[in-house]
Image (cartoon, helix red, strand yellow):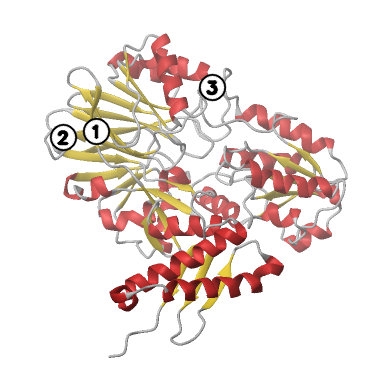
């Protein structure tokens, strides 16, 4: 590797997102002066970034070397793997590669962004399709996951082969798609695998994730158990296999399907356009659903992660055309993503208060994860026999644990890395070579900005401490407004005292300080802030507005 991080006759790996966190996956492979990107995802914001919905990996490293970037290969269509494409693909200006279902969803995103036709989107039509691009030859390897067309990537290079799993699991009855078999994976291992770059999400699960087919039987039993009651099922919209199951459950239990949520509508349309869900029942509209006897409708709803504007949240708030009443049933056919406990709990409390029955995967086997438990990881290790294990797609605790499991399983070398670590996989002993900046960006309104830039930092401070505005008026008492201070009835008295404090602070300035706008500004700011701290115990952000000096 050269001093400017250009890969030489070697094989490098660099994660810009998704290592040390779950979501926002962006991975780079470097060889012979060129880079290949695998996935370009995003994550959803929490309270860490007030006023922000979407968070992206900072691509500055590869943007500075974009002339050496050959393309972006997408493993599957989950947002944490494709969600950043419409925001960065145009700027990167390199070809995209995806299987049909993923490509269809990506094309719709590009169209919404005004980029359709401006970004090259290549569709890999066949299972085990191959892309030859620079020093890399990439073969798609179908694996089971909680979305249609989940794929691993077998990346051939002059220094050996990488098996990049993407998101995956083992499933003997996946409902949708035909995953690569154990025999086929063993054959790949027999031909030699240098490095396994592997999903770490469920490494702490001591059991296999379970089969979609088993969920089919459990959902059938659960829905049949609630005869005469309106049943709502919330699940991940992208889980086409689960949608197939729910369509069959509705048909076999004598219920009409009603779909509530735009993301569900979109996935069903894309799935059907690509050959899936061909026998899915024709959904009825909301008015028809509400006119049916309660036991003759099955509602599929978005919002199982507590999203405040999604269909389930609106139903819980009694603010949706689908009205729920005491005795109705909501099935949570999805897992609770870490970080969403509070919003999910809020919705469940609203439902419980209204006498609505809830069933989660803790009460019945109505959901299975799309990620491998420990036995599945150990099986893949045995089949592929990699020389090196590189855990990705997990928080640091997940990746460290997977490295431990891999070592115990006999994998000779394990490399635990984080976003920004450049790892040499070959030649020689694998390990970290260097560290580059790998930050975060946020979509703040219509602007992509640094996640810890001044705007977000100031917003956090205002949220915690409040804000005061001081307007200095020549020859008059300062005008002050305060927002977010817990003074309530005392506000008028506080503002009057704060204005007097500001006036006194300014009057104490002598000599050149009295004529210096910066000195006046700082005296007023400190006086206002000290008044707030004295009255409320808060240290608000203070903005001082001063009159312009006469020309």
Query: Based on the displayed image, in which of its 4 quarters is residue 34 positioned?
Result: top left
Query: To which quarter of the image does residue 367 belong?
Result: top right
Cα–Cα span, label 2 and label 1 = 17 Å
The image shows residue 323, relative to residue 4, as above or below, that is: below
Residue under label 2, please give it. Answer: 7
Mark 2 to mark 3 CA distance (whole Å): 35 Å
Neighbours of disc 1 within 10 Å: few (<14), some (14-19), many (20+)? some
Q: Where is residue 291 in the image (x, y as percent from the top left)?
A: 83, 60
- Disc 2 vs disc 1: which is toward the camera? 2
Q: Is residue 354 above or below residue 436?
A: below
Outermost residue toward the bottom in this view: 551
**Which numbered disc covers residue 204?**
3
Which-is-in-front pick, marks 1 and 3? 3
Q: Which residue is the site of mark 1? A: 137
- Pinpoint residue 344: horizontal percent, then vertical percent: 67, 44
Q: Which numbered disc, 2 or 1, marks the residue that appears first in the sequence?
A: 2
Residue 422 % position (x, y) = 25, 32
- Estimate the spatial distance between the alpha carbons at disc 1 and disc 3, rounded to whole Å: 33 Å
Vertical arrangement, residue 216 with respect to residue 283, above or below: above
145 on left or right of 548: right
* Disc on the earlier residue, 1 or 3: 1
């Amino acid at each position: 590797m050269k001093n400017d991080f250009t890969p030489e006759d070697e094989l490098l790996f660099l994660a810009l997102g998704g290592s040390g966190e779950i979501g926002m996956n962006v991975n780079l492979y470097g060889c012979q002066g060129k880079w290949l990107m695998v996935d370009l995802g995003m994550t959803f914001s929490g309270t860490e970034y007030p006023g922000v919905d979407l968070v992206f990996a900072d691509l500055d490293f590869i943007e500075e070397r974009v002339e050496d970037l050959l393309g972006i290969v997408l493993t599957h269509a989950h947002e944490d793997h494709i969600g950043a494409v419409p925001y960065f693909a145009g700027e990167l200006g390199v070809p995209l590669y995806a299987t049909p279902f993923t490509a269809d969803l990506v094309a719709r995103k590009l169209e919404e962004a005004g980029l359709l036709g401006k970004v090259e989107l290549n569709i890999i039509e066949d299972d085990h399709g191959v892309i030859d691009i620079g020093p890399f030859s990439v073969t798609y390897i179908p694996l089971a996951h909680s979305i249609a067309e989940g794929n691993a990537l077998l990346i051939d290079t002059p220094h050996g082969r990488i098996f990049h799993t993407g998101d995956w699991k083992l499933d003997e009855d996946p409902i949708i798609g035909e995953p690569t078999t154990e025999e086929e994976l063993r054959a790949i291992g027999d031909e030699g695998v240098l490095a396994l770059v592997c999903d770490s999400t469920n490494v702490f699960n001591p059991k296999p994730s379970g089969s979609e087919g088993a969920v089919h039987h459990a959902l059938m039993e659960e829905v049949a158990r609630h005869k005469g009651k309106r049943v709502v099922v919330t699940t991940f919209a992208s889980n086409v296999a689960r949608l197939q199951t729910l369509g069959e459950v509705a048909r076999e239990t004598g219920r009409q399907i009603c779909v509530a949520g735009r993301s569900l509508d979109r996935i069903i349309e894309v799935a059907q356009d690509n050959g899936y869900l061909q026998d899915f029942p024709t959904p009825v509209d909301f008015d028809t659903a509400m006119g049916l006897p309660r036991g003759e409708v099955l509602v599929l709803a978005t919002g199982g992660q507590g999203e405040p504007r999604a269909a389930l949240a609106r139903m819980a708030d009694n603010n949706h055309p689908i009205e729920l009443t005491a005795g109705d049933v909501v099935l949570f056919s999805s897992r609770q993503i870490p970080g969403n406990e509070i919003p999910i709990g809020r919705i469940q409390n609203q439902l419980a208060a209204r006498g609505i029955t809830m069933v989660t995967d803790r009460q019945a086997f109505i959901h299975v994860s799309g990620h491998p438990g420990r036995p599945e990881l150990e099986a893949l290790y045995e089949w592929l026999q990699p020389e090196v294990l590189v855990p990705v797609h997990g928080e640091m605790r997940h990746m460290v644990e997977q490295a431990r499991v891999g070592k115990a399983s006999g994998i000779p070398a394990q490399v635990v890395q984080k976003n920004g670590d450049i790892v040499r996989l070959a030649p020689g002993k694998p390990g970290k070579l260097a560290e580059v900046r790998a930050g975060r960006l946020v979509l703040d309104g219509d602007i992509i900005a640094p996640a810890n830039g001044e705007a977000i930092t100031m917003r956090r401070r205002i949220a915690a401490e409040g804000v005061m505005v001081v307007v200095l008026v020549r020859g008059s008492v300062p005008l002050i407004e305060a927002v977010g201070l817990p003074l309530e009835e005392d506000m008028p008295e506080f503002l009057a005292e704060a204005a007097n404090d500001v006036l006194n602070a300014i009057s104490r300035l002598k000599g050149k300080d009295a004529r210096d706008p910066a000195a006046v500004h700082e005296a007023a700011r400190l006086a206002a802030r000290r008044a707030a701290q004295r009255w409320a115990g808060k240290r608000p952000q203070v903005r001082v507005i001063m009159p312009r000096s006469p020309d």
